[in-house]
Amino acid sequence: MKPSIYGLTREQLIAWAIDNGAKKFRATQIWDWLYKKRVQSFDEMTNIAKDFIAKLDDCFVINPLQQRLVQEAKDGTVKYLFELPDGMLVETVLMRQKYGLSVCVTTQVGCNIGCTFCASGLIKKQRDLTAGEITAQIMLVQKYFDERGLDERVSHVVVMGIGEPFDNYDNVINFIKTINDDNGLAIGARHITVSTSGLANKIREFAETGLQINLAISLHAPNNEVRTSIMRINRSFPLEKLFEAIDYYIKTTNRRVTFEYIMLSGINDRPQHARELVALLRDKKKLVYVNLIPYNPVSEHDQYTRSSKEDVLAFYDILKKGGINCVIRQEHGTDIDAACGQLRSKTMKNDAETASFDEKIKNDMYTQVIS
């Protein structure tokens, strides 16, 4: 299976071109065709010699994804279901924000982190996405606008879709370098956010990259007891280890950290939880920001329900009075399969229940959904 050329950073493309007998400017031309003109076939690269086009075609594909489904919400949110070359499915979400068009990308097929409230983890990790497959999600969303003649561009990216980004670290870093490149999509570093459930060792490594990328931590609880009960990752990286890494990140980068906090009724939304969270963050409150997130119910996790509006506002009020910068996240796409992983899970179930669906996909996917 040929890799996607989107998987090469500009420096890697230059090195590949030189290794294959071309000069540096040839790689620059190819890069321009890919990310400025956004062609979908090598044959469209009219200033590249035919023999070199043939070499590109022998070694790479451009777009490795097939669009399977699209859901459009009344608020302009668009959820895409893409099929990978091996038949696996991933989700990508476009959200219209006041500040621009934001795309949430997926980095893995399935997830091994084991958050008990999350639709993404219903199916265990099958594999990492390549850097090319992650980049292709951005390119296909942009193609959605290009084909409609809309003068709009993806301006912000959040790496918060299915999977744990730091469990696919190298591919995610290459993806970030590609979309951030000034000679390509030129998505600003401060317009890119990576979210992790708390892989402390990778947070330290990320701090040393020098990238001005935003970091978000999926926290969801103010103490080890609650966090371990809803997030298996806390067994490996309890709050003490996690916050040692966060402190290192802040000291090294002097950058703010966002804490994501999904509000689960009766689990983590009581006033005492809010006060614990204030205490946990008090010593670094100038460089932290809490994002309170309404829970999108998942049928397979019916033990959880979303916190009431009154409880969310009371929680928010305690944080604000404690000097913690926070916001209640605006919801997007509530009239479609809103929770990350829901569209993929539903589609896989429907496919598996269709008599004509390939038997191998039934075995590979359906059994994992119901196990």
Image (cartoon, rainbow, N blue to C red):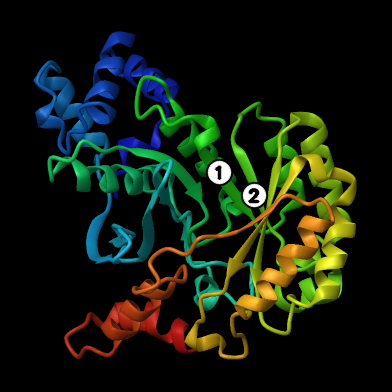
**Dots 1 and 2: beta carbons under 8 Å?**
yes
CA neighbours of label 1 inside 10 A, class few (<14), some (14 to 19), many (20+): some
Q: Mark 1 = which residue?
A: 193
Circle nearer the N terminus (1, 2)? 1
Q: Amino acid at mark 1?
A: Thr
Residue 23 visible, this orientation? no
Above or below for 97 versus 239: above
Quarter where residue 337 is shown: bottom left
Q: Is residue 355 above or below residue 8?
A: below
Of residue 115 and residue 352, the one placed in the foreground of this image is 115
3D distance between C-alphas at marks 1 and 2: 7 Å
Q: Could you tell me which secondary element the residue under label 1 belongs to?
A: strand
Mark 2 = which residue? 216
Image: 173 above or below 236: above
The image shows residue 143 at horizontal and vertical percentages of 21, 43
Please tell me which residue lies in front, 321 or 73: 321
User: What's the amino acid at mark 2?
Assistant: Ala
The quarter of the picture where residue 4 lies is top left
Secondary structure of the residue carrying numbered label 2: strand
Task: Determine whether, in the image, residue 75 is placed left or right of residue 293.
Answer: left
Residue closest to the eye, 182 or 113 = 182
